[in-house]
Amino acid sequence: MMPAPETTLAIVFQLTQLLLVVLAAPLLTGWVNQCQAWLQNRSGAGVLQPYRVLHKLFRKDAVMAHNASWLFRITPYIVFGCMWLAAAIIPVIAADLPFSRAADVIALVGVFALARMFIALAAMDIGTAFGSMGARREMLVSFLAEPALLMVLFTASMISHSTQLPSIVQALAHHEFVLYPSLAFAALAFVIVLLAENARIPVDNPGTHLELTMIHEAMILEYSARHLALIEWASSLKLFAYISIGIALFLPHGIAAVGDWAGLPLALALLVPKLMLAGAGLALLEAVSAKMRIFRAPEFLGTAFLLAVLGLLIHFLLGA
C-alpha cells in the first residue's frame, strides 16, 4: 500500500528538520561565541569557527588510553544520537511532525538524562581524577536541574492539558492570545536550567580548563579526534534543543499548525530571528555574570525549582 500524500509530506519535513538541526547547531554555537566576542570588544573567530573545529577534529587520528573500555568508545556516538533525537522530537518548524508525537516531555527529559549518564560513566571509566571530579559535579547539577525542568514543562502541560509538545504548541500558539503569569515564572526558571544544563556561566565556563571551575570539560579531557568532535557537536545540538524548547513553550508563534503545510516557509523564516535573539540574549547573560563557586550551584538551581513550582501553583490555584 502506498503511503498517503500527507504522510509522505510529513516524513519529508521531518527529515528536513533532522538535517536542519544537525547542520545549524554548530552555527548557533558560533553565533553565541561571536556575540560574546562583540560584547567583550573583540573581533572574534567568526560564526563558522565551530565548523572549522569539527573539520579539524574529524581529520585527526584518535588516541585512547590503554584501559579504555567499550563504554568509553561508544559514549560519543550515544550522546550524539541522544541529542539529535531530542532535537528531532521538539517542534522546531511544525507541530505535527512524526517524531514530535513519539515522546512526551517526560521522555524528552529522559533522553537528556540518558546522554548524561553515559558521559558521566565514560568520564569515570579511565580512572583519572579530573574525569571523576567532573562526573560528580555533573550529577550534582543534573540532580538539581532536572526537577526544575520538569516543573517548567508540567506548567505548560497543565495549560494545554497534555504532556505532548505538539499539543502544548497548539494550545499556546494557535488559540486566542492569553498572558499566563505562571509561564512568566516558568520562563525565569527555564533560563536558569538552560544555563546549568549547557555548562554556561555562571554554573560552568566552557572556555576554561581550570580545575576549580570546569564541570563538562573535565569529563571529556580524555577524548580526541572524531570522538571529541562528536561530543562537541552533541553539545551544540543540546544547546539548540534547549533553545528550541524555550521557543516552543514561551515563543511558539510562527510554528506551523497541524496540517498547515503552507505555513512552513514562514516558520523557517521566523526561526532564524528567534535563534539569533536567543543566542544574543545568552551571550549577554554570560557577559554580565561571573562564574560562581560550585557550592553555590545548589542555591542557584534551587531558585529555579522554586520559581517553577511557584508558576505551577499559580496556574493550579488561580488558573492563570
Image (cartoon, helix red, strand yellow):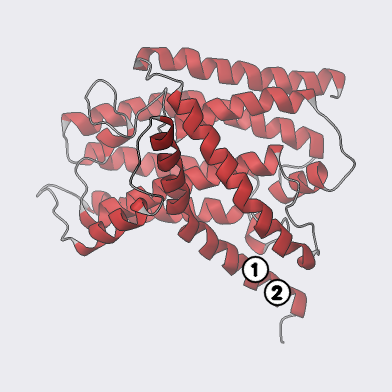
Quadrant (top left, top right, bottom left, bottom right) of the C terminus: top right
What residue lies at 27% left-to-right and 31% top-to-bottom? 208
Q: Is residue 303 left or right of residue 81?
A: right
User: Does residue 101 show up?
Assistant: no
Q: Is residue 305 left or right of residue 239?
A: right
Figure check: 250 above or below 23: above
What residue lies at 47% left-to-right and 59% top-to-bottom? 22
What residue lies at 70% left-to-right and 17% top-to-bottom? 310
Which x, y percent locates residue 43? 35, 41
Identify the secondary structure beneath mark 1: helix
Which x, y percent locates residue 265? 70, 64
Q: Amino acid at mark 2?
A: Leu
Figure check: 266 above or below 187: below
Answer few, some or many: residues within 10 Å of disc 2's Cα (few below 14, many 20 plus, some between 14 and 19): some
Q: Please, which residue is most extreme toward the right here?
A: 176
Q: Which mark is residue 129?
A: none
Kindly report the distance in space between the C-alpha atoms of the residues bearing marks 1 and 2: 6 Å
Q: Looking at the picture, tell me which residue is in the foreground, 27 or 16.
A: 27
Q: Please, which residue is most extreme toward the bottom here?
A: 1
Identify the secondary structure beneath mark 2: helix
Query: Residue tagged by mark 1?
Result: 13
Q: Looking at the picture, tell me which residue is in the foreground, 297 or 109.
A: 297
Query: Residue tagged by mark 2?
Result: 9
Q: Amino acid at mark 1?
A: Phe
Answer few, some or many: residues within 10 Å of disc 1's Cα (few below 14, many 20 plus, some between 14 and 19): some
Which x, y percent locates residue 74? 30, 55
What residue lies at 34% left-to-right and 25% top-to-bottom? 137
The answer to whether the residue labelled 1 contacts the one labelled 2, judged by CB atoms less than 8 Å apart, is yes
Q: Is residue 267 left or right of residue 272?
A: right
Q: Is residue 44 left or right of residue 91?
A: left
User: Does residue 158 show up?
Assistant: yes
